[in-house]
Image: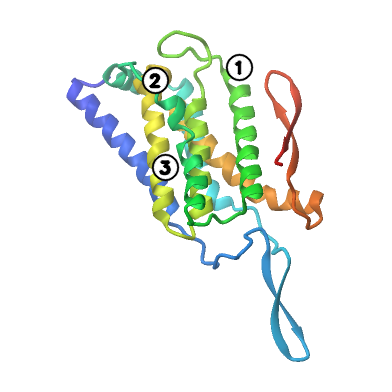
Amino acid sequence: MFASHHSMRLNFVLISSLLFSQFANAQFQLSARKPNADSLYSRTPHYWNGLHFYRKDSVAPEKFPVKSFIIPGVLIAYGFVAYRLDPTLDLDESIQEEVSHPQTHIDNYLQFVPAVAVYGLDLVGIKAKNNFVDRSLIYVMSSVISNSVVFVLKNWTHELRPDGSDYYSFPSGHTTQAFVSAEFLYQEYKDKSPWYGVAGYAVATSVGFLRIYNDKHWFHDVVAGAGFGMASTKLTYWLYPKIKRLFSKNKQMNTLVMPTYNGSYGLALVHLF
């Protein structure tokens, strides 16, 4: 426990600043590969009669991007460790006492703002990496994966919220969805400018802060939620091209079926008309 309100405020600001700086630094690691007209396909070189040309009908093999999961993994690990570790629980309580003043519901809507921005930017002429159908299926798939994981963990951990309203505190679902949206914005526009990603992560970080401010989550709930949101979207961007090749056979895919869990096991069917 800290000695004064001033020291508690300082520690919270430092921790929040460090957390956001890691998110921002991750977004500046741009891919060296030039963007393609259709991001799901590669421009593979072919030769005919001594002439060099490109045919956009093959997909470049892609290894699992382990390095891109380091930061989400650290955040998730911290959330699980802090869930039971006494020193971090003291930190959570100190932050909660200093920050929580429940009086706003804007976080219910702010969590979707980065995702809405993807469609807004595309609409005004700043084209996203993927076409409407592909990016929509990617966003839905990311949300299904993250929501399924969050639902299972909330029921398994059975952690009491700071305001005592229920036992579904860990991890923060709002924060998870906000970081799904932020990573979605980053992935679609990282080849345009890293600042789109930075802006999206700033919004997502504010959602995490508001969940603490509204006395709905502990600090470690929010940190873990950020990790799950980032990881779910990164995983989807790696999986989606493989699923598309498997089921669509190079045709436009507008239907996606995938397993989900929301109290019971089932299938999620998404069809875009």
Q: Residues within 10 Å of mark 2 (few under 14, many from 20)?
A: some
Residue sitting at x 18%, y 25%: 6
Residue 64 x/y as whole percent: 64, 53
Query: Which of the marked residues, 3 or 1, is nearer the chain's N terminus?
Result: 1
User: Mark 3 is on which residue type?
Assistant: Tyr
Q: Which residue shows up at 39% across the image and 38% down it?
A: 203
**Disc 1 crowd, CA 10 A, few/some/many (<14, 14-19, 20+):** some
The image position of residue 235, as x and y in percent, is: 62, 45
For marks 3 and 2, give the one nearer the viewer: 3
Query: Tag 1 or tag 2, which sits nearer the N-term?
Result: 2
Q: Quadrant of residue 206?
A: top left
Does residue 178 appear left or right of residue 129 in this picture? Answer: left
Looking at the image, is 204 positioned above or below residue 193? Answer: above
> Residue at label 1?
155
Q: Does residue 230 sit above or below 40 in this rendering?
A: above
Compute the Cα span from label 2 to label 1. 20 Å
Question: Which residue type does callout 1 highlight?
Answer: Asn
For residue 131, the mark is: none
Q: Nearer the viewer, mark 2 or mark 1?
A: 1
Q: Position of residue 119 (x, y in %)?
A: 52, 46
Location of mark 2 (residue): 89
Return the disc, 3 or 2, that comes first in the chain's sequence.
2
From the image, tell me which residue sits under label 3: 201
Q: Is residue 180 left or right of residue 44?
A: left
Q: Quadrant of the N terminus?
A: top left
Q: Relative to residue 78, is residue 273 drawn left or right?
A: right
